[in-house]
Image: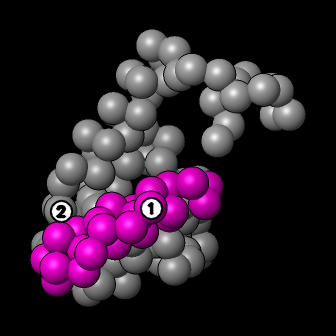
Amino acid sequence: MHLSGAHGSHPQQPGAEQFTRAAETLGLLADRTRLALLHTLGGGEADVTTLTEAVGAARPAVSQHLAKLRLAGLVTARKDGRRVVYALTDGHLARLVAEALSHADHQLSGIPRHD
């Protein structure tokens, strides 16, 4: 686990700033629509129309959630002609979402816990 300012350094105990940033990120994930958007984007770039269909939410709501995620630096947006295409900023977020969904699956299905 990497918890230091420089790659290759010895891991250290997380500091207050790391806990604050992690809490902010987890707070954004605490919304069903945003979590579904991030999960969908974990599969690759997508535009608002594709995302709206994938998450089953109204287009204005999807646009508002994407704006929040963009402001938080969790997704990027680029123009492709008249479309705006969104993507995750890094693989850490895709893995975090996948782990949260896996945890939920274990809870719902009764699959035994594991390390």
Residue at mark 1 to residue at mark 2: CA–CA distance = 26 Å
Residue ID at (50%, 55%): 93
User: How packed is label 1: few (under 14 Cα within 10 Å), some, or many (20 or more)?
Assistant: few
Tell me the quarter of the picture where residue 110 sits.
bottom left
Q: Look at mark 1 in the image and give the residue it sits on.
A: 115
Q: Is residue 12 visible?
A: yes
Q: Secondary structure at mark 2?
A: helix
Residue ID at (18%, 62%): 32
Residue ID at (82%, 27%): 9
Residue 17 position within the rendered picture, expressed as x and y whole percent measured from the top left: 48, 16
- For this rendering, which residue is in front, 58 or 44? 44
Residue 4 magenta-highlighted: no
Tell me the quarter of the picture where residue 96 sits.
bottom left
Residue ID at (26%, 86%): 53
- For this rendering, which residue is in front, 65 or 60? 65
Residue 26 position within the rendered picture, expressed as x and y whole percent measured from the top left: 32, 43
Q: Look at mark 2 in the image and give the residue it sits on.
A: 32
Where 19 falls versus 82 (above or below)? above
Which marked residue is nearer to the observer: mark 1 or mark 2? 1
Residue 107 magenta-highlighted: yes
Residue 94 position within the rendered picture, expressed as x and y whole percent measured from the top left: 50, 64
Report the span colored magenta: 90-115
Amino acid of disc 2: Arg
